[in-house]
Amino acid sequence: MRTQVVIVGSGPSGLLLGQLLANAGIDNIILDRVDRDYILGRIRAGVLEVGAVDLLDRAGCGERMHEEGLVHDGFELSFLGRRQRIDLKGLTGTSVMVYGQTELTRDLMDHRAATGGRTIYNAANVTPHDFDGASPHVTYEQDGDTHRIDCDYIAGCDGFHGVCRASVEDKGLRTYEKVYPFGWLGLLADVPPVHHELVYANHARGFALCSQRSHTRSRYYVQVPLTDKVEAWSDDAFWDEIRRRLPQDLAEAMVTGPSIEKSIAPLRSFVAEPLRFGRLFLVGDAGHIVPPTGAKGLNLAASDVHYLFEGLREYYADRKAAGLDAYSARALSRIWKAERFSWSMTMLLHRFPDDGDFGSRVQEAELDYLSSSRAAQTAMAENYVGLPY
Ligand code: RFL
Ligand code: PHB
């Protein structure tokens, strides 16, 4: 087989890139090691920046998001029993869109299927070859046969545990990493959200987040030790714990119900540099991870896709490589700012076992300062709604 761009990974970055390329007349094939239902079973992000919303529109896949997504003009911080609203719209003129990654992925998959895009699921042992030489190609195995796809470029959209970054580890890749000493236990339930906006809670028992997917579906999280096992958390234990971490009025208003999904995710900050090795590009989680506190993971995947798509489009339209040459530096400049923001939100809102009471008091002072300073709120709001592409 031959195509212009092989995309490894059928998550949000691979699908978004594939659709933008297809719309621009650039042929591409997506390979994933698992199948569509497995990918759609993963419950992940829920907040889209305006840049990600625009990109989904440009891909031609934004219709359901605009119908069913919820536009949020602000969010709340809670601490010491108090609640402080961050007025995103008032401070920045911009809002965010609450729309689940699962739904966005489904929209992209359906559109790709309807427009005849080629996706190969259950492709085993996907391997990129000769991307620093003259004949880049990707091999994979399926039904006992090995297949080969020749191409011009390879987009590594295969997530944190993918093969693309692994294949450049001995080629001058540099990595930066911070692992946090706790995880998030998340619960999804068909109950109305406790509040119409998201609430991020700093509490002596640990962080909590009240998020949502719709007016009837809620997504809640609590900080837990990494040693906790999800099987040991009953739904009742979860509901009791999150209520303890919220101000009394919210705790009393919370509607509980059986979970649809429950899982524990570790928190990590990670950046790989550079993001280009010859004709191979790293995109989204393949190149970087943020802790979910700032809701930036999916949004960074979208900005990477934007930069890479612009480079590829320019290359195929005008045979100019300037955009592709600039991809790594442009993407990393935005990535590091989102890394900084996600790290600072994580440090502000979680209990760190080694930081003791001093750490808690410093957090409280910062939250108190935020409550009284429009400048501090503006800085937080600007980063939360997303820095410009
Ligand atoms: P994805 O979504 O991980 O998709 C990668 C795809 O590549 C496939 N793949 C391979 N295919 C072929 N060969 C291989 N060797 C392959 N290895 C992997 C995988 O099957 C998969 O389909 O990466 P992408 O597209 O870059 O998208 C990034 C986002 O998914 C990610 O940034 C966010 O979901 C991060 N994230 C969250 N972000 C938020 O903003 N808010 C959240 O609440 C939030 N929760 C989460 C998350 C990420 C999690 N992970 C990665 C464990 C919760 C979890 C559990
Ligand atoms: C979510 O709804 O899953 C979500 C929202 C905001 C975050 C993290 C996760 O910061």
Image: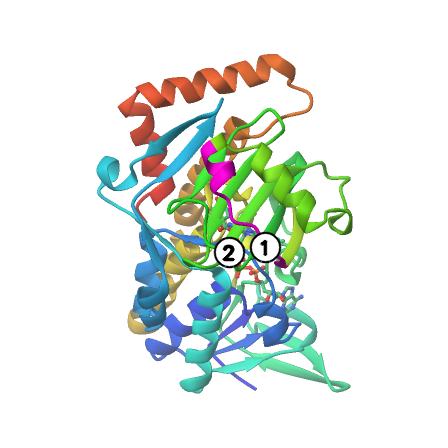
255 in the magenta segment: yes
| Residue for badge 2 | 191
Q: Earlier in the sequence, mark 2 or mark 1?
A: 2
At a point 50% along the width and 20% down the height, the residue shown is 363
Q: What segment carries the magenta color?
A: 249-260
- Which mark, residue 22? none
- Which mark, residue 257? 1
Disc 2 from disc 1: Cα separation? 6 Å
x and y, in percent, of residue 376 in the image: 33, 24
Instruction: Indicate the amino acid at tag 1.
Output: Gly
x and y, in percent, of residue 211 in the image: 47, 48
x and y, in percent, of residue 300 in the image: 44, 51
At a point 41% along the width and 42% down the height, the residue shown is 333
Q: Quadrant of the N terminus?
A: bottom right
Instruction: Indicate the amino acid at tag 2.
Output: Val
At a point 39% along the width and 36% down the height, the residue shown is 76
Name the foreground residue: 110 vs 8: 110
Name the foreground residue: 289 vs 361: 361
